[in-house]
Image (cartoon, grey):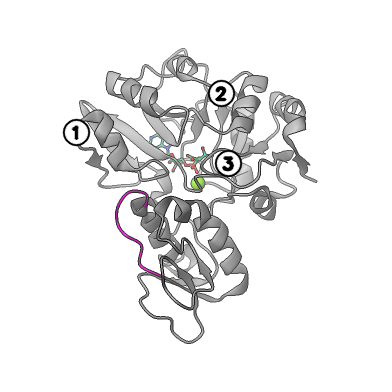
Amino acid sequence: MTKRWTENDVEEAAAALRAGELVAFPTETVYGLGGDGRSDRSVAAIYAAKGRPSFNPLILHVPDVEAALRISDLPPAALKLAEAFWPGPLTLVGPLRADAGVSKLAAAGLTTIALRVPAHGLARRLLTAFGGPLAGPSANPSGKISPTTADHVLAGLDGRIAGVLDGGACPVGLESTIIGFDGEALVLLRAGGLAAEEIEVVLGRPLRAHVGGVTAPGQLTSHYAPTATMRLNAETVEAGEALLGFGTVKGAAMNLSPTGDLEESAANLFAYLHQMDATAARIAVSPIPEMGLGLAINDRLRRAAAPRKSDI
Ligand code: TXA
Ligand code: MG
């Protein structure tokens, strides 16, 4: 049985991590499936619990930029972004130091490592109590919708992990934005909870779009898949469909944001998809503007609507 822990149980959750067990924890983006990032055994247990292909590397969560620098010599542009946006929904991929003491399995054999300093109070307390880097992919079975509540975590992973630290609903609701470095260029590897435009303002130059193969991220086409079929950019609702609305549309079963606010929509997206997936066989989704957090929202919706692995 997986335990449900509260904010009073951070020490117990940290002890479970030190014993090599897995603990799901809230972050400002989505819930993470935490395990000791220094232990191959714990990291292997994460892959097993998620049913994730083991070539897909994990993000390491650390308490601050100093801890990040013990794992990766982040380039100057990365440090500028870290200063502006950490703690927060930004992941930086830098070269893995030889003396980082990190599980090779966490990096999935790559010479780079993804690092993130989360802003959520409970995640920060857990990191301090645990005292090491926490490997933490989203706490959902591979290919399913990311969890934004402890109930979502338990629906997917009950019995497969020691416990979940319940911090309520995640405020951002979309996974972190991932930035990689290619020489002088900064590459947007995954659109996410921090708008690319905000990053470009701090950098003073545009990010390069990620092209080509699966470096890994949620680049597998049918990621975030609900069981229901999905139809995007729906201007009208067809018979048998339930509408996931945006803005002032009429007749929506649920509305991501009646006022058309993209941040509110991001925060609601996965919870509403979970909820509608439980009751509707066909989900139509109103058009969402392709700007700010709308980029990441549309990215997740396109993946949710893509042909299922079992279909192709
Ligand atoms: O908001 C988030 O990022 C959440 C919370 C829990 O922190 N975590 C999350 O982790 O979304 P995950 O494992 O579901 O997604 C991390 C993505 C993966 O798609 C992985 O392929 C990519 O980051 N990634 C990890 N290390 C990488 C690396 N060295 N190079 C390129 N991509 C990497
Ligand atoms: Mg994920």
Residue 125: x and y in percent read 64, 25
Q: CA distance from mark 3 to mark 2?
A: 17 Å
* Residues rendered magenta in the picture: 286-293
Residue 272 visible somewhere in the drawing: yes
Q: What type is the residue that disc 2 sits on?
A: Pro
- In the image shown, does 109 or 272 lie closer to the viewer? 272
Residue on which disc 1 sits: 205
Q: CA distance from mark 1 to mark 3?
A: 37 Å
Give SS at disc 3.
helix
Q: Tag 1: Cα neighbours inside 10 Å, few (<14), some, or many (≥20)? A: few
Q: What type is the residue that disc 3 sits on?
A: Tyr
Q: Tag 3: Cα neighbours inside 10 Å, few (<14), some, or many (≥20)? A: many
Pointer 2 or 1: first along the chain: 2
- In the figure, residue 115 lies in which quadrant? top left
Q: What type is the residue that disc 1 sits on?
A: Arg
The residue at the point 48 percent across, 87 percent down is 239
Residue 18: x and y in percent read 70, 23
